Amino acid sequence: MSENTFLSLRHLEKVYSNGEKAVYNFDLDIDRNEFIVIVGPSGCGKSTTLRMIAGLEDITSGDIYLENELLNFKPCKDRKMAIVFQSYALYPQMTVYDNIAFPLTINTYPFPAVAGKLKACAEVREILQKEEASAALENLPKKSKDRAEAVADRLEISLAAAKLYLSLIAEEAPMSKLEALESAAKEEAAAKKLVYNEKFELLDQDGNVKMEDRKMTSYEIRRKVYDTAEILDLVPYLDKLPKELSGGQMQRVALGRAIVKNVPVFLMDEPLSNLDAKLRLTMRSEIVKLHNRINATTIYVTHDQTEAMTMATKIVVMSKGFIQQIGTPEEVYSRPANIFVAKFVGSPSMNIFEATYCRETGELVYGDFRIPLSEDFRAKHDEFYRAKAEELGGALENFGDPAREMIKKILSATGEKFETTKKVKKKGFKRIIGLFKRDKEEESAAERPIAEEMVKKLNACLEGDHILLAGVRPERIRVEKYDPSKTYENCIIVKPTVCELLGSEYNVHIEYCNKSIVGQVDAKEKITTKDDLAVTFSGEDVHLFDPITGEVLK
Amino acid sequence: MEIEETRRKRERAKSKRRQNLLSLALLSPYLIIFVLFTLIPVVMGFAFSFMKYNPYNGETNAFIGLKNYLNIFDFNNPVTKSFWNSFGTMLVFDIVAVPCLMIIPMVLAYFINMHPPGYKIFRAIIYLPSVVSITIVGIIFGNMFAGTKTGLINSWLGTEIHWLAGQPFHGDTLRWLVMLIASIWWQTGTNFIIFSGALRDIPKSLYEACEMDGGKRRHLIRFVTLPNMKSAISICLFNTLIGYLNLYGQPVVLNELDNAGVLVSPMMFIQKYISGVAYASQTGYICACAIIFGLFVMLLSTIERRVMGERRRSRRRTVAAKRYLADRDFLKTGSLREPDFEGGTHDSD
Amino acid sequence: MTATKRRRTKSERTRIREKTVSFIVLLIITILWAFPLVYMLGTSFKSDLDLQLHPDRLFPSSWSEWTLDHYEGFIVRDGAIDNMPLWMLNSLWSTLATVALTVILDLITAYAVVFVEFKGKKIFMKFLLLWMAVPGVIGTAPSFALFATIRNSLRITGLGNYFYIYMWIILPGTTGIFNMLLMRNFFASIPQDIVDSAKSDGAGNAKIFFKIVCPLAKSTMMLIVLFTFTGSWNNLIWPQLLLGSESSYWNTITVALTGYTGGSAWSYLGIAMATSVFALLPIIIIFIITQNKMIDGLATTGIKG
């Protein structure tokens, strides 16, 4: 672990009490001010991970460090994190103001201890010398309590100073009165042997500022809540109840409750999925703006890959409890690490087809397409398969939990449906019997044949032709209207089955070799299902994946 | 064109008429029974309360104005005395019983919501007494607390306490205690089930949010559990309150010979004076008593609704926030922005 | 596997502690709550001698003391038909009539209110809601007066009187506004689309009512049946008023059992308990069959109000 990582998640794992494993080996370093998006289909363990970070869910194994401080055993309130839930989780009986203020009202916070009287005197002295101060006394509210607060707000002084100022200006010679007060306060401080710095913060024997834990005063809370409400445009709604708000407003209140705590880490659990499409778009940019404005580190969980691509500085793609890829949006999009990421990221999703790899010619063949591969591909290909076969073979020799997990990880990437051994909660009589005998053999039985099968297949790939998965992004598929006068190379001529106009472009669906292929094409020309189209793509745009392990070859 | 128009109009009117007829046919059975057996008696009750009325002897019936009501406040009248006595005893009992019947079910619901093993069995058994009729409750508790050595409790304690035989208003605390125990046993179930349903429906994320905000267990109860149970509490309080104002069964079945005739609740009072020919000439007066009592019930239930209902809120936070925001930038701009108190930016969403 | 080896985490430990505490508390409460019923059951099997000698025992003091004596007299006592079967019969038919009428009235009324447009619908509903706030006690006395007046003026006697009384016992209970609103709220929650699609398929009101709405309303109907059944079976105050001066053969079981309460009943302890067990049986059977539905239904309707 590098020394200056901000938030570091080390090998997080989660096993639920019913024996189901939700998260495997989650390893991630997060820098300050990063916007991390954990994305994956539902049930992939992303929310569980977030809840482990927040402290709402116990960590089965692994560690969480925030600025090199171990967080595992801290209760969630001490983790310096705020969470925004999908359901907003606003207290229904409280107004927006009370909802935002709630975390501040029930907690104590460390404050530097201050020599209050002296500080107030110094502040008032400064103000008395200023010209424009008297302007601040215009239009004061009627209630005396509000007046002091208004003065404090206007002149940016403490409430105590504002009160003192208001009482002094009513007198005839405020300056002399102030001096008398100040000297009295100084004497008092000297009698108590207080040591303080130029900001009137009390110092201990080592010269450090003394801190004291106390609740915030209602004045402090109000200022904080009002500031937050202003950021989020919630001022007109402060007196409303959550049920009187729209979804977007509730979402902003939930954000406000997180912001007001002034914590370095924000956690968001699918915060936008309860909103309608249009609002989601605006809130998306709002959240990013907010993130930049308050300099927080955000971990954001979503199942929507568009959200991930547009918001993140770093994306974590998860499937079935495993991290599939970590990278910037560009990396994840243009260099997917495996077939799962390739399929999951991008909309419309990548076209995947089973192409045959010709060892002799070094070509990829799919129907009429022949895609030449580079010279060094064969070496790379052989190297890949040899290494994989070796790795899996090694695992087979000593088949234990790590090997089983490896198989599960591979299967999570290929997305193949398969029944791993699940511990079924036995009921009644069987459960009692189960306590006495444990069948270890049976448990590992399910993964082992799969592993054996895989090794066999991998070895077979080292010689002869075999199938590879080729992926091409829809926008990389070149589609044009067929012109009989031209000649086309490495091209197929088909009629599209569906043409969807998206405004600036078409999504053209074509049927080829029993496989539906989607291409994106500029909408300059009108395309209908009656037109013949020439479809092609270049070899450079092809991503190649191994069908057995799902990993990327090229 | 015009013919078409009139035809359409006629058809619309026809279908409307058909709908009205159909609804009348469907509603009439309910309406007839409701009017005959519920509405008319109440209206008549008001009428009788201004009359001298005798169902067995129509000749003496006459309108006597407010005399019945004045009688209710004439404390020299023995019947009046027994009405107010019954009223008072009932009230004292309710002040103890109603809180018990709110708090005990709530505590039990809190525990059952932790879902210990076998909680469904616990829930069923705690609810079970609610379906037992009050006479059977009376038989069971009457024999458990029987005043001789053969009573279960007495035989256990080796005493001969006359639990249920205290003279009215003199040492009958024990009888009320037994009534309280029987009531708790009998009626905890319903509120308990409603509370446990309300508890179950509180979203888990609220607890988690409160925990993230630094809430401890007492904060969780104070800020999440109780406020979210408010509507359930309100309903249960309303039902329990009304039920116990109409207290009847418990004092009737839990007594021993000496107190048989003692009227300790307005329902008992009404029951006694309305049944039998002996008091038939008092019917008008009894109706007036029932109305006074009914008004009291209505008053209490209205108060309950007011207290549990939503309070109107001011706009003070919004106003204060706007003033603060105006004041805050004073030094930067050097002038006071006139705070805009009334209008506000309204979101389109 | 790992799951069995690992240490219990903190929240799991709190959860287990919570469960243990609540289990113990609820076990104690449940035993207390079951106790009176167990006492009733045990006492009903005690012989008269045992009742005198061992009042401190819940169950007969020895195996030889178990007896069914108290149950035997129910059908025929001293050579004549006992009151008991008659009481049960009275209760049973009047309760069933109340339940059936309530359900039918609630169904058709709620259907009219929700699915048929008519003039004055809003006023009708507003009136019912307002009426809920009127305490029923105001009507008790005049109802009885009305009951007596009509009977006197029509000179109803004999068997006619019996049915006249039972009409007054049954009918007022069938128009409970709460039950009707329960049904109406359920009907209102049926998606309009279902009804509309049936209409577009050419279904008339009768068809919609019988084929779509009624089958959907099964669970709400069940709930109303349960509420009405227990309410009517256990009703004391009103039947007692109406039946007070009549032949004891005419009593419902709940009213009749008041004879076993109070100090006068000590000498019949065994019989009182056996009769209670017998009277409780129908309710308990219904309860055991439906308790889960009943409790869940109560929990959800309670919240919605």
Image (cartoon, coloured by chain):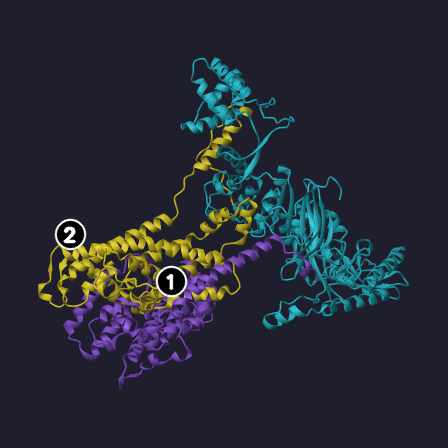
Q: Which chain is purple?
A: C
Residue B15 pos. (x, y %): 36, 66
Q: Secondary structure at mark 2?
A: loop
Q: Chain of mark 2?
A: B
Count residues near mark 2 (Cα–Cα under 10 Å), then give few for <14, some for 14-19, many for 20+. Answer: some
Q: Which chain is yellow?
A: B
The residue sitting at 47% across, 37% down in the picture is B344
Residue denoted by label 2? B75
Which residue occupies the extreme left position in the image?
B59
Residue denoted by label 1? B185
Question: Where on the picture, by quarter, is residue A488?
Answer: bottom right
The residue sitting at 28% across, 58% down in the picture is C135
Q: Chain of mark 1?
A: B
Q: Is residue B249 above or below residue A160?
A: below
What residue type is disc 1 on? Trp
Q: Write down the colour of chain A.
A: cyan
- Considering only order in the chain, which callout, 2 or 1, is on the residue closer to the N terminus? 2
Q: Nearer the viewer, residue A402 or A454?
A: A402
Residue A38 pos. (x, y %): 67, 50
Which residue occupies the extreme bottom position in the image?
C79
Q: Nearer the viewer, residue B138 or B237?
A: B138
